[in-house]
């Protein structure tokens, strides 16, 4: 047993050195393919979602409810799925469930008639997203425990790449074939991902031989100070993310600035390309050099400024510039928070810790767009962006305060 220094600016608990995991390049490749298809299925309709809901006649408050139901479902489902996965000592079945529910979600969106169907589709998407805990824990199992943050940096890049790929084609599909085309594409991609998931390798580095977590141990995992703090910060981060690019920014572009469906693809690219870049390098370059808590504070501060700037944007080029800077800023803190959530948690308890972390930040996915939709209905669409900027400012203050406590 040896003690390592934590990459987050504090001594880490004792970490057991493990032998290299018996995986091949093909194992990693199949996992990457399924991960990309998973996120494409979930995000292929995101740029056109709020304009599509308005097209179907939903009010701002109902749009906020549909968007928020995605996070609310995850609050209820993510932690139980993590515990269930730990008890079964399996991750792969939950990955397959994610691909199936992702395809089902897209199908529900295109059923005509009542607003109940888009709501049901977004709830089903929340169930799909809740299985992400299995993806993260399975892939971390391909690495030694002390390399968990490296695994999370890679998977964060794959996440953003899949989101970018799905969102990049969304506007063009809708422009060429109608509002329902991105959802139809999502059905096919989800089913393709389900087929590909059969080839994923379940890690065998002792996970299946360990006893499942007990209730008392679960309380200990949940009470871990770093886990609670990064979960609170992640609530605020996802509040901002699901108010902006994954929420009302596309609607701002179409209703206030005259954007076409195809223009939404350019707005997505402006956000997601810098976001993908910083997601890849945040844990590898910035955090080791400047300290993770400092980078967290900087990311929140910048995202707050450029979220407020969305409300001030007089034209599409200016809006795209705000998205580029906001994508860079939000890419700084999200991978660091993900790695910190499981850095000092043993392999057998990681699904529970990740389930708790993801259930917590799902509160931001719910509260952010829900409250922003309510504010938008009362005072106009810009009020939601000011609310998002205030949430980011709170995250910057907390990260800076906790940076001082951990130095």
Image: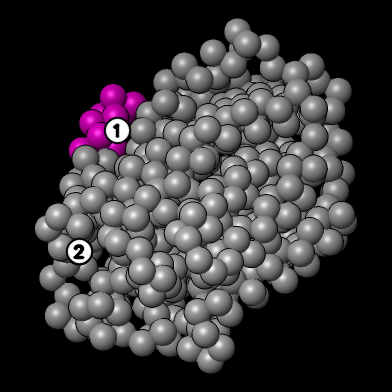
Q: Residues within 10 Å of mark 1 (few under 14, many from 20)?
A: many
At numbered mark 1, what does the secondary structure look like: helix, strand or loop?
A: helix
Q: Nearer the viewer, mark 2 or mark 1?
A: 2
x 78%, y 67%: residue: 192
Residue 406 within the segment the image draws in magenta: yes
At numbered mark 2, what does the secondary structure look like: helix, strand or loop?
A: loop
Residue bounds of the magenta highlight = 397-407
Do callouts 2 and 1 mark residues in contact (Cβ within 8 Å)? Answer: no
Report how many numbered discs are placed on residues in the image: 2
Q: Which mark is residue 229?
A: none
x and y percentages locating residue 77 in the rendered image? 58, 35
x and y percentages locating residue 302 in the rendered image? 24, 57
Left or right: residue 368 compared with residue 112: left
Which residue does the numbered mark 2 point to in the structure image? 381
x 84%, y 28%: residue: 208
Q: Is residue 326 above or below residue 137?
A: below
Q: Quadrant of the C terminus?
A: top left
Residue at the front extreme? 113
x and y percentages locating residue 360 in the rendered image? 45, 34
- Of residue 67 and residue 289, the one placed in the foreground of this image is 67
x and y percentages locating residue 135 in the rendered image? 68, 46
Q: Is residue 52 above or below residue 64?
A: below
Q: Which secondary structure type mostly characterizes the magenta part of the structure?
A: helix
- Of residue 292 and residue 316, the one placed in the foreground of this image is 316
Residue 403 within the segment the image draws in magenta: yes
Which residue does the numbered mark 1 point to in the structure image? 403
């Amino acid at each position: 047993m040896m003690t390592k220094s934590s990459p987050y600016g504090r001594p880490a608990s004792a970490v057991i050195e493990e032998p290299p995991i018996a995986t091949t390049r093909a194992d990693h490749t199949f996992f990457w393919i399924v991960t990309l298809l998973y996120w494409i299925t979930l995000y292929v309709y995101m740029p056109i979602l709020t304009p599509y809901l308005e097209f179907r006649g939903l009010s701002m408050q109902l749009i906020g409810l549909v968007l928020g139901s995605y996070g609310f479902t995850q609050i209820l489902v993510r932690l139980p799925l993590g515990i269930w996965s730990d008890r079964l000592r399996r991750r792969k079945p939950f990955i397959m469930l994610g691909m199936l529910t992702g395809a089902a979600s897209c199908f529900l969106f295109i059923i005509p008639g009542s607003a109940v169907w888009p709501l049901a589709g977004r709830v089903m998407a929340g169930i799909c997203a809740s299985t992400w805990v299995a993806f993260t824990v399975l892939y971390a199992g391909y690495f030694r425990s002390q390399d968990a943050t490296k695994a999370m940096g890679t998977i964060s890049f794959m996440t953003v790449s899949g989101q970018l790929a799905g969102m990049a084609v969304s506007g063009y599909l809708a422009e060429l074939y109608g509002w329902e085309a991105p959802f139809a594409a999502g059905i096919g991609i989800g089913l393709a991902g389900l087929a590909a998931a059969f080839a994923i390798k379940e890690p065998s580095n002792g996970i299946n031989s360990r006893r499942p977590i007990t209730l008392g141990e679960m309380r200990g995992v949940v009470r871990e100070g770093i886990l609670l703090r990064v979960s609170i910060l992640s609530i605020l981060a996802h509040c901002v993310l699901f108010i902006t690019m994954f929420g009302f920014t596309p609607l701002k572009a179409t209703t206030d600035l005259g954007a076409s469906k195809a223009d939404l693809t350019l707005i997505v690219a402006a956000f997601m390309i810098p976001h993908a870049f910083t997601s890849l390098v945040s844990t590898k370059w910035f955090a080791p050099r400047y300290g993770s808590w400092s980078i967290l504070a900087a990311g929140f501060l910048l995202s707050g400024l450029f979220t407020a700037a969305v409300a001030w944007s007089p034209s599409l080029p200016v809006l795209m510039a705000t998205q580029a800077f906001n994508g860079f800023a939000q890419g700084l803190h999200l991978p660091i928070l993900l790695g910190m959530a499981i850095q000092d948690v043993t392999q057998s308890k990681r699904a529970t810790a990740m389930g708790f972390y993801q259930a917590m930040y799902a509160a931001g996915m719910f509260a952010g767009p829900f409250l922003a939709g309510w504010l938008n209905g009362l005072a106009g669409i810009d009020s939601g962006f000011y609310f998002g900027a205030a949430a980011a400012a709170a995250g910057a203050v907390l990260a800076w305060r906790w940076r001082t406590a951990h130095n």
